[in-house]
Image (cartoon, rainbow, N blue to C red):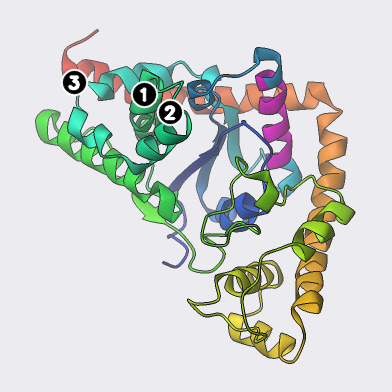
Amino acid sequence: MTLPPSNKTILSAVQPTGQLHVGNYLGAIKNWLNLQEDNNCIFFVVDLHALTTRHVPAELRKSVQSALAVYLACGLDPDKSTLFVQSHLSAHAELSWLLSCYTMFGELSRMTQFKDKSSRNADNINTGLFSYPVLMAADILLFQTDFVPVGDDQKQHLELARDVATRFNGIYGDTFTVPAGYHTKEGARIMSLADPTRKMSKSEPSGCTFLLDSRDDIIKKFKRAVTDSGSDIIASPDKPGVTNLLNVYSSVTGKPIATAQAEFAGLGYGDFKLAVGEVVADMLAPISGEYNRIIADKAYLESVAKSGAEKAFPVARKTLSKVYKRVGLR
């Protein structure tokens, strides 16, 4: 899908658990920089979602600040976009409860992410993990969102938000905008460097390059990246490792995959992986430097979060008030 029309409301968010990685940047944040120029963009840190896993409160507070600082370091502009922290607006939790009464148990039980996370966290299968998609639906519908930049792993959650909005509208009349998905074709799904059949994830750090990694660490990780049998550097279903590295290179440089393949023709895997690692390190260097400057300025970070929440509040409250009125609450 091409860029959505201008003057639309576009919303996306990120969890503060763990560091953001190059997949987050190439698959999401990099694209947001263009979107914020001509649209009403809302980007926030979903700290309420982070509560589904056990955590240390002090570390969570630091992670929230860090995630907001990364947003800013990557180029998101608080004068162009609305940047805030989810828990600073109680409307998210309130709407989540209201929408849970219009979400079917069967719909939630079919969520593949719940099944996956439950299998990996058998000692903490809590209700919040099960109802997580309802809170995500509330995040989206609260702001009458037109478009949600979404990866393949989040399509099911967006479809649930659409279904809940349509169901509520069918019962009570036009209340919510039914959101559409938006994603780029290239760079939308960056895979693990250790296992290119799985999406890059901060839960598997061995295959993950973080935005704040040092240059040496970035180069080392790419040198260790899994490749495939044979020696041809081509994108192919039977070469997931090489395909992933070509996808990374293409996303960073803006060069088409075909151009990248021609550029690396005849090179060995070692030189190829080094070249990809170097362009990633070059891309992340200014982000890391800007992050270090911003994270040291706590007053600035607090002012961004505060002004963002104040900007988001009237929109969220208007939607919530409409929902309360529709269901018969005052």
The quadrant of the rendering that contains the N terminus is bottom left
Tag 3 residue = 326
Residue 54 in picture, x, y percent from top left: 56, 19
Please report the bounds of the magenta region as a residue range: 60-71
The numbered dot on residue 157 is none
The front one of 57 and 184 is: 57
Per the image, is 69 magenta? yes
Circle nearer the N terminus (3, 1): 1
Query: Measuring 65% from the left and 14% from the top, which residue is drawn there?
Result: 57
The numbered dot on residue 315 is 2
Identify the element where label 3 is drawn.
helix
Q: Main secondary structure of the magenta part?
A: helix
Q: Residue flagged by tag 1: what amino acid is it?
A: Lys
Q: CA distance from mark 2 to mark 1?
A: 5 Å
Circle nearer the N terminus (2, 3): 2
Tag 1 residue = 318
Residue 303 in picture, x, y percent from top left: 72, 23
Q: Residue flagged by tag 2: what amino acid is it?
A: Val
Which residue appears farthest toward the top when viewing the image? 330
Residue 196 in picture, x, y percent from top left: 57, 62
Q: Residue flagged by tag 3: what amino acid is it?
A: Arg
Query: Measuring 79% from the left and 67% from the top, which residue is drawn there?
Result: 279
Q: Rate crowding at label 3 as few (under 14), some (14 to 19) or many (20 or more) other CA atoms within 10 Å.
A: some
Tell whether label 1 touches label 2 (CB within 8 Å): yes
Q: CA distance from mark 3 to mark 1?
A: 12 Å
Q: CA distance from mark 2 to mark 3?
A: 17 Å
Query: Measuring 20% from the left and 28% from the top, which residue is drawn there?
Result: 105
* Left or right: 298, with 16 as reference point: right
The front one of 48 and 40 is: 48
Per the image, is 292 magenta? no
